[in-house]
Image: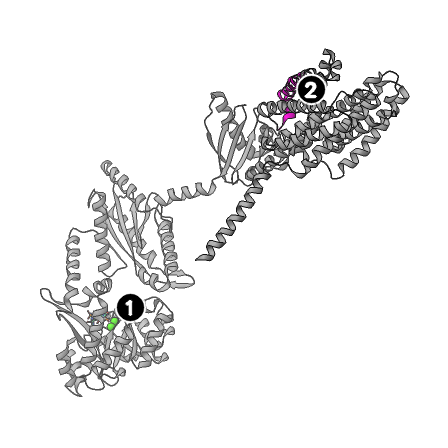
Amino acid sequence: MQRPLLLNGCRRVEETRHGAWEQVRGYLPSLWVAVLLPSAIFATIALHHMALKTGGGVPNLYPPTAILLVALLRHRPAVWPVLFFLGTGTEAIAHREFGFDGPILAINCAYNLLETLLIAVAMKRFCDLTNWYLSIRWIAACTVFSLVAAAVAVSLGFALIFAIDHPFAQYMTPARWVKQTISDAASVVLIAPILLSWTEPAFRQSGKSWGFVEAFGMMAAVAALTSAAFWMSESVAALFLMFPLLSLVTLRAGLFGATGGAVVATAVAVWATVQGWGPIANHPDLPFGDRISFLQLYFLGAILSSIPMTMILKVRSTLAEAVDAQAAISQAALSNMAQGLSMFDADDRLIICNGEFSKLYKLPEELTRHATPLDKMIAKYGRTGKQLGKLKRLVCGAREAGDREQLDGEIKLPDGRVINVHCRLLDDGGWVATHEDITERRQAEERIAYLANFDALTGLSNRAQFNEQLKRLVSYLERGHRFALHAVDLDRFKEVNDTFGHAAGDELLRQVATRLRETVRTGEVVTRLGGDEFAILQFPLEQPEEASALAARVVKLLSKPFTINGRTVVIGASVGIALAPSDTCDAAELMQKSDLALYRAKVDGRNGYRFYQPGMDAAQHARRALEADLRSAIKNRELELHYQPILDVKEGSVGSCEALLRWRHPTRGLVHPAEFISVAEDTGLILPIGEWALNAACREAASWPAGVRVAVNLSPVQFKSSRLISQVKGALERAGLDPSRLELEITESVLLQNNNSVLKPLHRLRAMGVSIAMDDFGTGYSSLSYLRSFPFDKIKIDRSFISDLGTRADDLAIVHAAIGLSRSLGMICTGEGVETKEQFALLEAEGCTQVQGYYVSRPLPAHEMQELLSGGSNLTGRLLKQAA
Ligand code: C2E
Ligand code: CA
Ligand code: CA
C-alpha cells in the first residue's frame, strides 16, 4: 500500500522539477542564438568604431538594430526580455570598449531598445512573416515602421542628451537628426531582409553542403573581377558589374552562399578601406567621409538585388515540384481508372486521355498524343473512326443546344463490343467523356430477354412465348382458321435421367428438340413447356388427318434410338391432340384437353397418340380414383396372386409357375395388372406392392412339390431401390424357400443402364442361387447386347411373336432365331402366350424348352394351383387334355 504512494510522490517531485526547467526554457532562446546574437552585434560595432576612429568615413548603416530586430521577429515575445538583455547588453559593452561614457551608453541603449521594440511590435502585429518577400505591403510596412520608430527613438535620444546637457549636445543639429533617422531606418530596411531570409525555414535547407565555400570562392573572383575593372577604367561605374555577377553567383550557389559570401566581402572591404587599402580608400572621386557608407550601400544593394530573384526561383521550383506531384497523382488516378477517359478542347483536339481509352478503341499511339484532333481519329481510323464520329455529333448537338447536362451515347465497335459514353461539356467549350465497355452487360441483358421467351437448354420457345402464340392463334379462329395443339411427353425420360445422369438427360432433350424442330413445317411452333413436356402448335390446319399425320411422325421420330455420349438410348413419346375450334376455342381449355388426350395415350401403352375425346375427363377421374383406391389395397388385403404354370416341353411336367398380380376391388371386381401396374409405378406404390408379391409368392411356393419353382415379376422401379436384395433374402428366409426355386423376371428397360448399379445387384441375386429371366424378349431394341451384358438363365419370347406364329413368316423367323440363340448361350427359352395346339407344336418342333399360355393353363388362384400341383404325375396329360 505504501510503496506505490512513495513512487507516486517521487515521480511528482521529478515532474515538478522537469516542469520548472521547461517553464524557464520557455523564456530562453536557443544556444545558437545566445552565442550568435552578441557575437554578430559585437563584431559589427567593432567595425563601426574602427571606421569612426580612423576617420575613413562615418558608416551610414548600423547593423545591430537589424540583427536584434530579426532575432525578436523569429521568437515569441516571452523570449524578448532575454534577447534585449543579450543585444543591448552587448552593445553597451562594445561601445564602452570604444570610449562611450556612462550617460551616452544609457541613452544609446534606451533609444536602440525603443526603436527595435517599436518596429518588432508593429511588424509582428501587421505583417505576415512567412512569404514576406512576395509582399509589397511587407516592404512598405517595414520602411514606414522603421522610419517612424527611428524618428521617435532619435528624437528621444536627442532630447535626453539635451536634458542632461551632455557635451555631445553641440553635434545634435537638425541635419544630424535627419541623417541619423534615415540611416537607422535604412539599416533596418536593407539588412533585416537579408537576415530574415537566412532564418526563413523554407530557404534554410536549400543549397549544397559546400555552397558557402563555393560561394565564397566565387565572391572572391567577383571581387577580383570588379576591382580589376574598377582599376582599369578608374570609374566608380565599373563597380556596378557586381550586380549581375552577384546574381549569377546567387543562381549558382543559392541564397545562403551568395548573401553570406557578400556579407563577408562587405566586412572585408570595409575593414580594408578603414585600413586605407584598396581602390575605394584612395579614390579621388569619393569624398573621404562617405567611403564607408558607399561601400556598405554598394554591397547591400548588390545583395538585396539578388534576394528576390533567388526567392522567386525557389518558390518556382517548389511550385513546380507541387505541380509534378499533382501530375503524378492525376496520372496514377487516370491510369488506374477502370473506364476510359478522354478530354478534348473546344476545337475537339485531345487534351488528355488514359490508357484504357486507347485500349478500348485500339487507338495507335500516334492518335492518342496531346492535341490530336478528333477529326484525325475519325478520318484515320476506319470503321472505329466512323463510330467515333457519332461521339462528335453527340457533342456538337449538345454544343448547339447549349445543353450542359450529362450526355449518354453508345458506340458499337466493328468487333461487336459496345461502349457506353458519358460526356459532359466544360465551361471553355471543351468536353470530358468516360468510356465503359458494357458488352458483357449488354449480352447479359440480351440473354435475359432471350430467356424470357426461349428455353435455355433447347433453344425452343418457352411456356411464356407459347402462351402468347396460343392466344394469337385463338384470335385468328374468328376468321375461320383452325389449328391443333399437340401435347408431347417423352416416355421413360425419367429413367434415362436417373440412370445416365442429368447431363445425358439434357443432351437427350436437346436432341429431341432438334428432331421436333426438323419435323415441323414453317409456321408451326415447337415449345418446351418444362421437364420432358413439349408442345406443338400446328397451324394452319385444313383436315384433322394432318394432325394425326404430324403426331404419328413425332411418335415415330422419337422412338428411334438416340446416341448419347456414345451410348444408344431408346425412349418413346406419347402425344395428345386437341383441335381448335372443334374441341374448344379457349386457350386454357385447349391445354387441358390436349393433356387429357396425352394421358390417354400414355395409359393405352405409350408410344402413340390420341385425339381428345369427350369421355376422357371421366376416364381421368376414374384413374385418379383408382390411384386413391390402390393406396389402401394392401392394407385392405385386396391384392392376391394368381399362378400360371409353365410347362417343360421335354418332360411334359410343370417346372415352374409365374405369379401374376390380381386386385380384387370391392366395387369393380377383379382388376388386371395392365390397369394398375403403371399407376403403381408412377406413384411409387409398386415398391410395397412388389415386396408384398415377393413374400406371398415365396410363401405359396414353399407349399408346392419340391421340383416346382415360382417366377416373380420385378418392375424397373424396384430395381432402383437399394432394399431389393434384402427384400428377396428376407422373403426366401421367411418362407423357408430354397433360393434355387425362385425366378425373377425382368424386362430390358432395367438394363437400359449398362453399369454396375444394375449389374451388381443382378450378380448378387444370382450368387444367392436365384435365377434371372429376361421377360418380353424381342419387344425392345437391343436385346442381343443386353444378353451379352448379363448371363440370363432364361429368356421369355414375348406373346406378340407367338400369336401370329402360324401366319407370319417373319415371326417364325424371329422365334426360330431366339430359340437358337438361347440354346447356343445355354439358356432356357420360354414361349409366352401359347394359345393353340399349332403354336405349341411349332415351338416344340423348334426345340423351345418351355411354354406358357392359355393352351397349357390360364393363371389360377393359389388354392386351384395347389390342387393342380398335388394332382400328381399325370398332370401334363390332364392339362393338355383339358386344353384340347
Ligand atoms: P407378363 O409378365 O408378360 O405376364 C404374362 C401376361 O400374359 C399375364 O397377363 C398373363 O395373364 C398373360 N397371358 C398368359 N398366357 C396368355 C395367353 O395365352 N394369351 C394371352 N392373351 N395372355 C396370356 P397379366 O396377368 O394381365 O399381367 C400383365 C403384366 O403385368 C405382366 O406381363 C407383368 O408385366 C405385369 N405383372 C403381373 N404381375 C406382376 C407383379 O407381381 N409385379 C410386376 N412388377 N408386374 C406384374
Ligand atoms: Ca412375366
Ligand atoms: Ca411376358
Q: Mark 1 = which residue?
A: 716
Q: Nearer the viewer, mark 1 or mark 2?
A: 2
| Residue 271 image-quadrant placement | top right
**Residue 539 seen in the current view:** yes
Query: Camera-side residue: 227 or 349?
Result: 227
Q: Secondary structure at mark 1?
A: helix
Side of 652 where 107 appears, left or right: right
| Residue 241 image-quadrant placement | top right
Q: Amino acid at mark 1?
A: Pro
Q: Which residues are magenta?
A: 130-155
**Residue 884 seen in the current view:** no
Determine the CA span between mark 1 and mark 2.
Answer: 120 Å
Residue at disc 1, CB closer than 8 Å to ligand 1: no
| Residue 323 image-quadrant placement | top right
* Disc 1 to disc 2: CB gap under 8 Å: no
* Picture quarter with the C terminus: bottom left
